[in-house]
Amino acid sequence: MKVDLIIRHAADVDTECLVIPAIDKGEKDKPAGSVLTAEKALQDAAKDLFASGELTGKPLEFALLYRPAGVKARRVLLVGGGKEAKFTPNDLRKIAGLAARQLKAKNIRELAIALPSGVHFHPDNAVRAAVIGAVIGDFDPDTYKSDRKDQRLNSLTIVAPPGSDEKLLHSAIEEGRIIGESQNFARELVNEPGNRLTPTILAERARKMAAENGLDCEVLGADQIKALKMGAFWSVAQGSDEPPACIILKYSPAGAPAQPILGLVGKAITFDTGGISIKPADGMEKMKYDMAGGAAMLGTMRAIAQLKPKVKVNAVICASENMPSGKAQKPGDVQIAMSGKSIEIINTDAEGRLVLADGLTYARTKLGCTHLVDAATLTGACVVALGMVNAGIFANDDSMYERFQKASHQGGEKLWRLPLDDEYRDIIKSNIADIMNSGGRYGGAVTAAMFLKEFVEDKPWIHLDIAGTAWIDDAKPFIAKGPSGVAVRSLIEFVRSFETHP
Ligand code: BES
Ligand code: MN
Ligand code: ZN
């Protein structure tokens, strides 16, 4: 999709469809004027709709007008934005996403989005959000449909009022495009089925992305994983005929301070059968998305390489299948992790924490990472606790938590903090080893996080459990069903926050 900026009155823009955010100003006595639209001609065009009560400005309510008088566009799509006082760039992102999806469905390939007037945030934030929303809305998961038409949008134009700062808005467009496309890059990977995205293929994709974006990339294979004594990672990989891949990406820009060195560690189980503790057949096909944490880290690194903040960032993506076989590990086995800790395997389906344990140790001891963040589709228990609305966030450091919380707010992603009290540690005590890999059903998201905490030592650390949010079961007006690309936007903002607030 081509993205352009035009500085002009919205009514004078020649386009297939002009999208106008309709924001409720809350003037009850004046229905026609109570919705903020860009200009008089557009207000006139929409007057009857507002007067009839068919459009009130409620979030994501919409109406399509054809060739309204005084407006150059062939169509005008009015999309509700909710109350003016509560309107944020994230609402505009959803409006843009809805517009993209509505128009695609009608085979309209070109749209122009007018910046809302009179809102209380800066126009560059509005522009960035609108571009992200449209790029994300343009994604569909129909990769392997043989009748798949090229249904991508051709062009998006951002319409800013006369007097706007062209240079500032141009760079906001560019940022929005980078962020949206990087989230879609993660979604494309997550969408791939297990037979078409093995650890080896994921590593190839990572290599290609790194080469295109000037990142260092190194891939450790089975022999190196064993040589590094990554016994927890290998215990998962040993059961599969497909070799594992530990993908390491480095972003080290000139002029960045020596520290911090951020470490992004992602779980990338390209298919999780559960192993010998095999999962039930029902719904098992969804376990192709068990690499969404790793994909989020790849999407984030892609964006960081293009946005170029002056902060060092490394990523470690632990890619493996989790399969049952004659070579697979068994419940009761004891494994020695790279850190030297011994682990009693209670359930081979608790494999994510095993690969991450060694990924975190590698980031800390081999890459010198000073701050760690991991993302993983780690537990069904997190889905039970938070559903598909919030991702779970855990932190061993309050200031890291606050930084991430702010970043997620900017990115418009929902997270809910879950606890890490010492008492939970007792649940994963083992009789034979230092720790067990499962504490059973109760508090399952927390005991999984407690397990990971054993491997971060003293480093400030964030753990994101995205099991419930990485896959969208029901389409929303602004995003297709399928892979969500969750965590990419928050992670990008988190990394960038170290440039402004070291
Ligand atoms: N990949 C799953 C977690 C998962 C469940 C992700 C549902 C997405 C949706 C993970 O590897 C797993 O199987 N976890 C087990 C842990 C248990 C055996 C302690 C779980 O949550 O049941
Ligand atoms: Mn599992
Ligand atoms: Zn898993």
Image: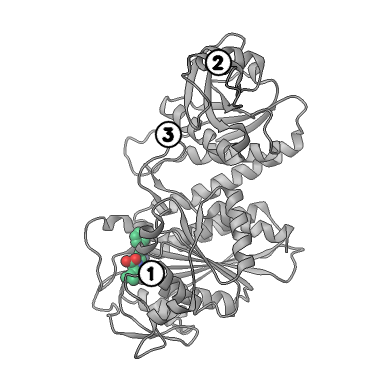
Q: Quadrant of the N terminus?
A: top right
Q: Nearer the viewer, residue 258 or 247?
A: 258
Q: Secondary structure at mark 2?
A: helix
Q: Residue 24: image x %, image y %?
A: 58, 27
- Identify residue for label 1: 443
Specify the amino acid type for callout 2.
Answer: Ala
- Write the residue at 37% across / 72% down: 351
Specify the amino acid type for callout 3.
Answer: Asp
- Write the residue at 44% across / 80% down: 425
Q: Nearer the viewer, mark 2 or mark 3?
A: 2
- Sequence-first tag of 2 and 3: 2
- Identify residue for label 3: 150
Whole-Å distance between the Cαs marked 2 and 3? 33 Å
Q: Nearer the viewer, mark 1 or mark 2?
A: 1
Q: Residue 86: image x %, image y %?
A: 60, 38
- Write the residue at 49% across / 27% down: 109
Residue 396 image-quadrant placement: bottom right
Quadrant observed for ligand 1 in the rendered image = bottom left
Specify the amino acid type for callout 1.
Answer: Gly
Q: Is residue 128 left or right of residue 57?
A: right
Q: Residue 327 bears which disc, if any?
A: none
Q: Residue 46 bears which disc, if any?
A: 2
